[in-house]
Amino acid sequence: MMRTGQAELARAAGILRAGGLVAFPTETVYGLGANALDEAAVRRIYEVKGRPSTSPLIVHIADLEMLPRVAAEWPESAQKLAARFWPGPLTLILRKRPEVPALVTAGLDTIGVRIPGHPVALELIRLSGVPVAAPSANRFMEISPTTAEHVRLGLGDRVDFILDAGPCKVGIESTVLSLAAGHSILLRPGMISRRQIEEVIGPIDLAPQPTSGAAHASPGLHRRHYAPKTPLYLLNAGESLPEGRGKLLSFSSEPASFAARLYSELHAADVEGWEWIAIRKPPATVEWAGILDRLTRASRRE
């Protein structure tokens, strides 16, 4: 049931126009949004999250009419993918417009753009009249929020307004695909799989792990990310549980259901006082690639 009405949306849109920060739901996770063309507002996102400037932000738009305000190109492959997957959890990396602050894109000449598949997110962007830069609404490297309560617990009063529309349906961050280099490169897997993309535009490449210290072509590429405070163990088949008092999380064998519950279950287990949390490793198939990516990064201890 949607908890956000027109009055809340109008207030949130006004906050965005005035340079404030609004946490809002998307189909993937809750985002921490600011006017993407307002450098001071974008800087607050980095400050509130404790996010390094090498990690670019994804810009959310309400429709393709808003695209020319942030992107300088629109290749045929992008048109085909947008027709198939937008609104939805696919981010396309394109050449950026010079008007977009360098802070949004980690100094790169490319920008990540998507149309979110959530009515509250779309109405917020329409009412604000601005493209909205929005990473996940949490402290950097911690578990992404899939409810408004996760945002409140993680960021507290550092956000000017929180729109609450209940749990996110997809549950993990968007697939990120670069189209900026003249060919297609999968930078971050998600619930739109490599196979689904290749059915639309043909073969795509996989990106290598980014160089430490350099600007990342996509968010979500740090070796440790999406992590609970409690040590998380990703167990191979037949591997024993760690010693001590811990919790083994059990999920559906169907990837969409697994993804929808993953962060919520990690949030809940993280506040229960366990010595460890464990999850059995899912299959290494394209349908599970986004989930396996998040679990692998969340379970790394550095």
Image (cartoon, helix red, strand yellow):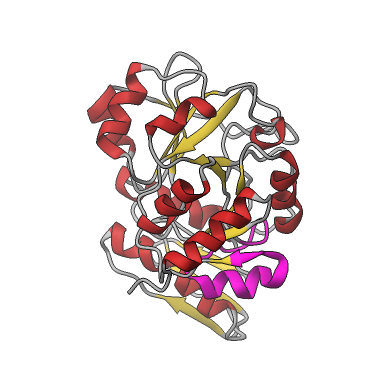
Give above or below for 253 relative to 1. above
Q: Is residue 279 left or right of residue 211?
A: left
The reply to whether residue 111 is in sight is: yes
Q: Compared with residue 266, is residue 108 higher up or lower down, i.e. above or below? A: above
Write the residue at 30% across / 57% down: 255
Q: Is residue 122 magenta?
A: no
Q: Nearer the viewer, residue 263 or 156?
A: 156
Note whether residue 242 is visible.
no
Q: Residue furthest left?
A: 199
284 displayed left or right of 270: left
Looking at the picture, how far across and down is residue 80, in whole percent? 28, 25
Q: Which residue is painted at 41% across and 60% down in the image?
A: 171
Question: How many numbered marks have been drawn onto this rendered protein structure?
Answer: 0
- Pick the residue in front: 152 or 282: 152
| Magenta-drawn segment | 138-161
Q: Is residue 199 left or right of 190 when viewed as pictured?
A: left
Which residue of the protein is positioned furthest toward the top in this rendering?
Answer: 182
Residue 158 falls inside the magenta stretch = yes
Picture quarter with the N terminus: bottom left
Observer-nearest of 202 and 71: 71
Question: Looking at this view, is 38 or 225 the one in front?
Answer: 38
Q: Quadrant of the C terminus?
A: bottom right
The residue at the point 70 percent across, 71 percent down is: 157
Q: Residue at x 41, y 71 (%)?
A: 166
Residue 97 image position (x, y, % from top left):
58, 22
- In the rendered view, tell whether residue 268 sits above or below residue 99: below
Image vertical order of residue 85 relative to residue 283, above or below:
above
Residue 298 on image: x %, y %: 57, 59
Residue 189, given in percent of the width and then of the height, sits at 43, 42
